[in-house]
Image: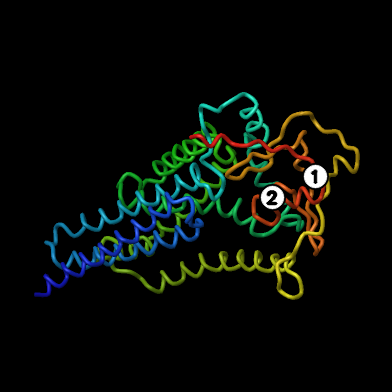
Amino acid sequence: MKKKISLMASMVLYLIAIIILIYYFSLEFNELLHLSPTGRIVLLLLSCLIMYFGGLALTKYIDEKYKNKVLKINIGIWFILYIILLSTLTLFDDYFYRGNFNILNWNNEIFKNYLSNSLNLIPFKTIISYITMFVSGNIAPYIFIYNILGNAIALMPFAFFLPLLFKKQNNFKTFLLTMICIVIGIELLQFITMSGSCDIDDVILNVSGSLIMYEILHIKSINELLKNIFLLEKNKINYKDLFRKIIIIVIPIILVLGVVLISEKKYINKNNQPFTHLKIIDKVKEENMACDEALEQFYEDKEYIYYFPCIKSKNVIVIYSNGYQETVKSSLEYGDITIEDLEKNNIEFIKQKKDMSN
């Protein structure tokens, strides 16, 4: 009787997980109801959590020798869902205005513009730039988080999935080589499709983040706990040692988050309301600066691609009510201003309508 109840419970839980996934994919392919990355991650995590309990219930019904296989199938499904999420965010996601590449509309001007604005092959150039701007207070904390910590965190799940699914990935050198190949592959796809930036610093951050997580998850007590939870192994765990290791890991994370939250206050006014921009200035025009004559793409939305008539995106600045300044490119990217704000401030730009036929 208990086995039958376990089987029914597992079926119900898997059915709920499938319904959530159907809802997720219906939103993924619906332009009018597109979820933010956070919303999609929450839905997938909820589905995976329900699937995990469904797997646990199923292990009460099946023979002992099949339990490990069932749980590994669960982990394999989670891994596939993670790959789908990663692919959409890096290559096809409208939320970041990606996935607009059309080989039929490809031309040298677009490619040259991409090379000049979105390609970086100098190690640590982007990282140092963001850190310098963050420390000096010239960049909003959330921009720093998205671009530096976000890149470091994005591929960390590989450190969980690969060693659990493939025994050879428990070797550090094998895992390192695998991650280098995966990250370079992602960057090459972004380069070929001109989706997002192709940056050597992304490779450094992605690989470093996955290696840090790999080392954390291979601390003996943590690794044994993971196997007990996800593979139902029966390893004896020294919980005092585990607690100490977790504290050592958590304290730096809390300190980093504390620094970010404190710095965030620089960009919030006394009434705890988001700061507003006062004006947008074109330093090239105001200071009569030299400007290389070439179209420079600085933004795109679903209908248009926007260009400056010369290479000057770093010199078109948004000034906020609290004194904070950032480039118009960053402000547009994170939704702090709109294209209409540029028009109101008499900033010259060119807009090109996208070919929507495909």
Q: Which residue is situated farthest in the top direction here?
A: 108
Residue 298: x %, y % from top left:
69, 41
Q: How is the image coloured?
A: rainbow
Q: Secondary structure at mark 1?
A: loop
| 2 or 1: tag closer to the N-terminus | 2
Q: Position of residue 331 (x, y in %)?
A: 70, 52
Left or right of residue 277: residue 97: left
Q: Nearer the viewer, mark 2 or mark 1?
A: 1
Label at residue 330: 2
Apparent side of residue 54 relative to residue 344 in the rendered image (left or right)? left
Q: Amino acid at mark 1?
A: Ile
Q: Position of residue 316 (x, y in %)?
A: 79, 45
Numbered disc 2: secondary structure: helix
Q: Amino acid at mark 2?
A: Ser
Q: Residue at x 87, y 40 (%)?
A: 285
Q: Is residue 343 left or right of residue 206?
A: right
Q: Residue at x 46, y 53 (%)?
A: 156
